[in-house]
Image (tube, rainbow, N blue to C red):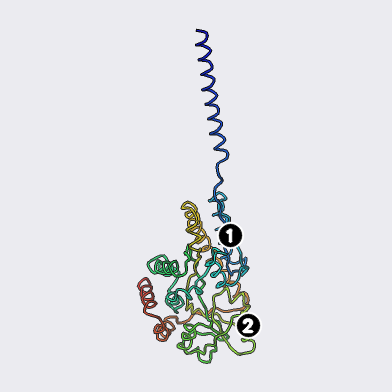
Amino acid sequence: MKKRMIALMVLVCIIASGMLFAAGSNENSQTTAAPKQTFELKFAHIAAEDNSWHLAALKFKELVEKNSQGQITVKVYPNNQLGSEKEVLQSIQTGTADITITADSLSAWVPVIGFMGTPYMIKDFDHLNRVVEGNVGDIIEKEIIEKVGMRPIAWFARGPRYLTTNKPVRTLDDLSGIVIRVPDVPMYVTTWKTLGAKPVPMAFAEVFTAIQQNTINAQENPLALIKSGGLYEVLKYVNKTEHVRGWIYVVIGEKKFQSLPADLQKVVLDAAQEMQKYERELFFADEQKLAKFLVDKGMVFVDMDQDSFAQKAAVGVLPLLTKEQKALYDMVQVLR
């Protein structure tokens, strides 16, 4: 009997020891589990550090790092730190950068988006929102993914372009004798030639001096560039042509995006939408501040006959659109 009791006690000890060992092994396996994979996103753009684009990029960084619980680190490079817009696009394609803010430069790969600069195509911000958030935006985004290998994850509105001069322009007749600097883009050249001005393609960096030397006497740009270029020192009137309203995309390299686990893809997309909302608030506030700044500097805002400008411009510009561009343009007009 004693032998049986001893044997039973030994057996109980063996079982207990095994259970303790198993528990210890299980606890040890939990504490030595492999750490979660981490990722880095390089977000490069051309805007200055006080620009709404950069502030929005910082908001994106904050949200992604917080909501990924540190699995994603976002490094933001403003002010051309990683190169020009085109150079950053190329870097994304080679994998040395990941995210940027772009639009016009994409036309090298996606010619159809050249229609985005068509004058008077977009009526106002509400119209723009319907365009980008609807079928037109879906078509453009699909083209960018397929032909450039980049995925739009957000979009920002761009300030409307204004004609600035040293005499008020209210009607088409007032454009007589206007020599206007334009970007070296065929659509811009044709637009102003059709309207009756004399367009001169020129780099923006040369505009201030060209006005001082009377080589040109007008230019057209959003308020932000009128301010940053110091043009309020050499031009008096901001004529409210508002002839181009456009938008710009925040894109991420498609390969990089697909390398992220599904839960982290959602973190990026959700943060991008919050970034878009944040930038929108900054954008509207900035437009008001810019207008006040220019008025305080002595510039005068002039109301003018936009309808006659739009009708005249269409005669020269619409024939420049390809069949695919004209189809998108027509879709935009349905949404007015």
Q: Is residue 160 above or below residue 38?
A: below
Q: Secondary structure at mark 2?
A: helix
User: Can the viewer see residue 287 in this picture?
Assistant: no
Comparing labels 1 and 2, the label whose residue is closer to the camera: 1
**Residue 257 location (% of width, % of height):** 49, 59
Decide which of 318, 143 is in the foreground and name it.
143
Task: Kindly identify which residue carries mark 1.
Answer: 58
Query: Which image quarter: residue 27?
Result: top right
Where's the C terminus, which quadrant?
bottom left
Q: In the image, is residue 136 above or below residue 41?
A: below
Rendered residue at 53%/83% (across/down): 184
Residue farthest toward the bottom in the current orientation of the protein: 177
Task: For label 2, count other residues whose C-alpha is less than 10 Å away and answer few (under 14), some (14-19) or many (20+).
Answer: some
Of helix, strand and loop, which one carries label 1? Answer: helix
Where residue 224 sits: x, y (%)? 57, 73
Residue 282 horizontal/vertical position (percent): 55, 64
Q: Nearer the viewer, residue 296 or 132?
A: 132
Q: Earlier in the sequence, mark 1 or mark 2?
A: 1
Which numbered disc covers residue 208?
2
Q: How far apart are the two marked residues, 1 and 2, measured between alpha carbons?
A: 32 Å
Q: Looking at the rendering, which quadrant does residue 136 occupy?
A: bottom left
Which three-letter amino acid code belongs to the residue tagged 2? Answer: Phe
Q: In the image, 93: left or right of 133?
A: right
